Image: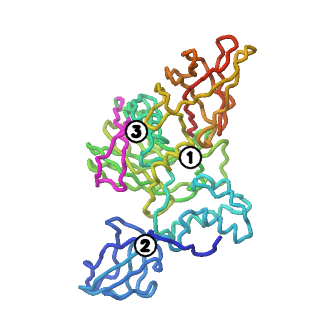
């Protein structure tokens, strides 16, 4: 491994022309790239040219976030050109920093390096990396970043809809878009996948879909609510830090939307809830950024997987003032897209993952054998698991057929549901030779695989082809 600054290619950004503001007096100029705010990093990360003269970093100019500060004010008529040198002096993944530190200490074990940057921190050897060192590295990442950072939520652009594309819930809820739980208490909430017009320009980063939630309030009950939430694994990454929650949203009748946060675990439920505040939505798409000071979790002990929760409130009676002060019971339509969460006290450009990377991340929490766009409970042979059993003994009621490996290891031991590939009946496998369904169950379930046990309904048989679909649910 090469220690020190790594060679880089690409990721350079031309700064928009700011010469129209040159007046011989002003020295500080906010900058944009393609009309969007982007952090400049350090002065050495920028090449700045005024009137054909290259400006010396730290001598002729400094930078603060996205603002250039000249020592000498540029004159009227001076020209400007500038470029940000992306990736220079930046750890785009903080675990690269951990890996470099390990190498410098003579360590070769890189088992802590993982593709899920906000998940594996707890797996790092506490004797090697203390909480103080971890906090220092996270702060360093925020202070020197000059390109996109990663969001902590999964499927924030609503690209992945494995279960369904719509649902209506009254005093209930479900996952519709992957990783996002939509629910209500007494209220009715209708959720649906909506497509952006092709080549639209209102919302950046070319999102394909957004989520629409239509809420009908239940007569203003104090305990009624409607909401959408996601739980982030391993909240230590935000413990004691300020995090930014940004999203694009609209409401045709200018309804409020609240954002709150909490923490807990898979075995003990909610540990702490923290109050958020609402914002009023426009009828046009608009970006909103809310900063949350997440309390320290130092010294807290809970059984099971720990999580931090981000919750959007569409309606909330007075009983929920502890969570989102100022929200009221509401009936209305809420459209939301481009949800991003990251640890920072300033707004940062966020790197959008590919749709396939989003699907891969979602499959830690939910998997299915059905093809993309085909929802559980559909009669289809495409994607069905099919195995030939060479001998069906008559000595037992149940017989093991085979191990079914999962697409990828899941975050917790999942709940497995089986479906006949022919009738789509739950709890069944299909006997291809007898053209009938057999009762079956999933057993020996773990995070990597499960086994299928069919119910034998006849005497000894040979060469039986059995087929089925499955879903694996492992949400927090």
Spatial distance from mark 3 to mark 1, Cα to Cα? Answer: 20 Å
Residue nearest the viewer, comparing 26 with 327: 26
**Contact (Cβ within 8 Å) of mark 2 with mark 1:** no
The mark nearer the N terminus, 2 or 3, is 2
Q: Is residue 319 visible?
A: no
Snapshot quadrant of residue 109: bottom right
- Which residue is the site of mark 3? 316
Residue nearest the viewer, comparing 377 with 464: 464
Dot 3: within a 10 Å radius of its alpha carbon, few (fewer than 14), some, or many (20 or more) residues?
many
Dot 2: within a 10 Å radius of its alpha carbon, few (fewer than 14), some, or many (20 or more) residues?
many
Helix, strand or loop under label 3 = strand
| 112 up-or-down from 105: above or below | above
Q: Nearer the viewer, mark 3 or mark 1?
A: 1
Query: What range of the chain is rendered magenta?
Result: 191-218
Q: Which of marks 2 and 1 is in front?
A: 2
| 315 up-or-down from 32: above or below | above
The mark nearer the N terminus, 2 or 1, is 2
Spatial distance from mark 2 to mark 3, Cα to Cα? Answer: 40 Å
**Contact (Cβ within 8 Å) of mark 3 with mark 1:** no
Is 434 on the left or on the right of 176, as rendered?
A: right
Is 206 contained in the magenta span?
yes
Residue under the point 36% across and 29% down: 218
| Image position, residue 189 (x, y; %) | 38, 33
- Which residue is the site of mark 2? 40
Spatial distance from mark 2 to mark 1, Cα to Cα? Answer: 34 Å
Helix, strand or loop under label 2 = loop
- Which residue is the site of mark 1? 263
Residue under the point 38% across and 78% down: 68
């Amino acid at each position: 491994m090469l220690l020190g600054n790594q060679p880089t290619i690409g990721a350079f950004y031309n700064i928009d022309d700011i010469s129209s503001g040159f007046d011989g007096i002003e020295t500080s100029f906010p900058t944009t790239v393609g009309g969007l705010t982007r952090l400049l990093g350090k002065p050495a990360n920028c090449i700045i040219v005024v009137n054909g003269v290259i400006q010396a970093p730290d001598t002729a100019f400094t930078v603060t976030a996205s603002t250039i500060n000249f020592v000498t004010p540029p004159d009227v008529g001076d020209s400007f050109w500038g470029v940000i040198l992306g990736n220079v002096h930046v750890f785009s993944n903080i675990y690269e920093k951990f890996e470099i530190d390990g190498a410098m200490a003579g360590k070769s074990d890189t088992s802590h390096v993982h593709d899920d940057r906000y998940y594996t921190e707890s797996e790092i050897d506490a004797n090697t990396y203390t909480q103080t060192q971890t906090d220092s590295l996270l702060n360093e990442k925020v202070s020197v970043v000059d390109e996109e950072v990663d969001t902590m939520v999964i499927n924030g652009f609503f690209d992945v809809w494995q279960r369904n594309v719509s649902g209506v819930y009254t005093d209930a809820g479900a996952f519709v878009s992957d990783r996002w739980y939509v629910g209500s208490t007494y209220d009715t909430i209708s959720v649906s996948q909506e497509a952006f017009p092709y080549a639209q320009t209102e919302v950046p980063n070319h999102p394909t879909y957004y989520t629409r939630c239509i809420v009908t309030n239940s007569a203003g009950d104090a305990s009624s609510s409607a909401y959408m939430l996601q739980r982030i694994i391993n909240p230590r990454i935000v413990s004691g830090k300020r995090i930014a929650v940004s999203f694009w949203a609209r409401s045709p009748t200018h309804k409020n939307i609240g954002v709150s946060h909490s923490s807990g675990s898979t075995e003990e439920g909610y540990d702490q809830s923290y109050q958020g505040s609402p914002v009023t939505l426009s009828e046009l798409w608009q970006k909103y950024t809310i900063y949350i000071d997440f309390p320290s979790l130092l010294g807290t002990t809970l059984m099971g997987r720990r999580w931090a929760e981000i919750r959007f409130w569409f309606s909330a009676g007075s009983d929920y003032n502890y969570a989102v002060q100022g929200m009221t019971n509401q009936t209305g339509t809420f459209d939301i897209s481009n949800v991003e969460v990251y640890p920072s006290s300033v707004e940062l450009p966020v790197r959008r993952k590919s749709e396939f990377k989003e699907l891969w991340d979602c499959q830690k929490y939910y998997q299915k054998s059905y093809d993309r766009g085909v929802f559980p409970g559909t009669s289809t042979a495409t994607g069905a698991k099919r195995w030939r059993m060479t001998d069906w003994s008559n000595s037992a009621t149940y017989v093991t057929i085979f191990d079914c490996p999962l697409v990828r290891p899941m975050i917790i031991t999942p709940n497995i549901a089986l479906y006949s590939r022919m009738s789509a009946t739950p709890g069944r496998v299909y006997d291809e030779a007898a053209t009938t369904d057999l009762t079956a169950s999933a057993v020996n379930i773990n995070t990597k695989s499960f086994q299928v046990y069919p119910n034998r309904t006849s005497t000894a048989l040979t060469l039986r082809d059995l087929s089925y679909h499955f879903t694996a649910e492992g949400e927090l």
